Amino acid sequence: MVAIFADTDKMKNRFFLPLLVFAFAFSLETASALEYIRFIRDGKERNEEGRIILEARTGIAFEARDGRLYDIMPENIITRSRDDTPFVPYTKAEMIERLKEEFPPDEGYFFLDNGPFIVVYTTSRSFATWYGRLLERLHSQYVQHWRRRGVELIAPEFPLVAIVLSNEERFRQHARQTGATLFPEQRAYYHKLSNRIVLYDMSGLQAFREGDQRRIATDIQRFLSHPSAYHNVMTVVHEGVHQVGFNTGMHPRYAPSPRWLLEGLALFHEVPDTNNRTIGWTLGPRVNSPRLEHLRRYLNRPHHESPIKKMLQEDDLFRRSETALDYYALAWGLIYYLERQKPKALAAYLKILQAKTPRSNDNAEIRIRDFESAFGSDWNTFERDFVNYLRRL
């Protein structure tokens, strides 16, 4: 499985990413006041309440009360005003009502409330129930795990939305409508601009839309007994980690975050628990065996430069088909090594990245400096210890 952020190309080609790169050009709003904006998006008028994240002559980055980010060009703004009302995200009840406008119940959409998550689904109640429980456990155990290792995390500011569609056709149609670009084999994605996870039912349980708890439990056990079940668990946990990370403060959502870290953390947590027959996943220090096998083969090849340094500096390595598998494996290996062997230094590194803002510059030199600030500049010793550790696994 290779996971991507589905909004990457859109951000690069339009306006939002240049804002992050050339942050000295704008003023950053305090976002204490509520902004009301009417604008054109995809040929239609939208009315949103929210806050300004960044503003420049070329447009604004606007965050709505449901957590969605919009890059709005000046020519697309119809009206704009503000008052002294403080910015407050939608409550879960308000968010569900908003979602019902976008996903009408009379068109077959249903809603589940699972802790910090709202699951919108057109699939079986069994699959949606399993997925909601999985997300709830993921959030709880993720936060506990990293807090125990000295990482400061927060409660999500917005209700977190997961959309579960009934089949692959509807999934890809939704991706096209929202401007997401997917790999052919992709089954799920986290969309950073909308702050949503989107996936489709891979369980084969579509026939069971309703049922009592006993029926749901039986359906989930049937799903988890299927040969492909734990690959599906890995897929949905991977994307869930992205959403949880950006909404608990592990990664600042408006500031640059190195791709290796985002993917490494998702790969670290995605490993299923084959002994858990109710959810299929429990956070634990399990080795991601396919990534380890690939990484060992990759590191045995000759390298003219440090693979780790190269990975820290170049996000595109994760997007290119000829390098993606190598660097996904390396990202997993590095996170696993640091979490197991250097947890205090890893927490210090994460704190450096958490402190970044939309004004923060991001380039290869800065990324190496950030890493060395936490782990030191003796690269020969670091890489030797890293490789030796992997050989002992």
Image (cartoon, helix red, strand yellow):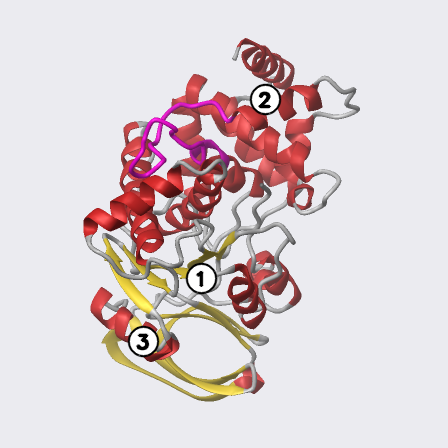
**Spatial separation of the CA atoms under disc 1 and disc 3:** 15 Å
Q: In this figure, what is the number of numbered marks?
A: 3
Q: Amino acid at mark 2?
A: Ser
Residue on which the image places disc 2? 377
- Lateral position of residue 18 relative to residue 165, left or right: right
Whether pointer 2 and pointer 3 mark residues with C-beta atoms closer than 8 Å, the reply is no
375 relative to 138, above or below: above
Residue on which the image places disc 1? 166
The secondary element bearing badge 3 is classed as helix
Residue plotted at (51% across, 87% down): 44
Report x, y in % for residue 384: 62, 12
The crowd level at tag 2 (other Cα within 10 Å; few <14, some 14-19, many 20+) is few
**Spatial separation of the CA atoms under disc 2 and disc 3:** 57 Å
Q: In the image, is residue 281 part of the stretch drawn in magenta? A: yes
Q: In the image, is residue 131 part of the stretch drawn in magenta? A: no
**Spatial separation of the CA atoms under disc 2 and disc 1:** 50 Å
Whether pointer 2 and pointer 1 mark residues with C-beta atoms closer than 8 Å, the reply is no
Depth check, front residue: 121 or 82: 121
Q: Amino acid at mark 3?
A: Pro
Report x, y in % for residue 246: 41, 50
The secondary element bearing badge 2 is classed as loop
Whether pointer 1 and pointer 3 mark residues with C-beta atoms closer than 8 Å, the reply is no
The crowd level at tag 3 (other Cα within 10 Å; few <14, some 14-19, many 20+) is some
Q: Earlier in the sequence, mark 2 or mark 3?
A: 3
Using the image, tell me which numbered label, if any, was put on residue 105.
Answer: 3
Q: Earlier in the sequence, mark 1 or mark 3?
A: 3
The answer, for residue 365, to whether it is visible in the render is yes
User: Which residues fall within the magenta stretch?
Assistant: 267-288
Depth check, front residue: 278 or 9: 278
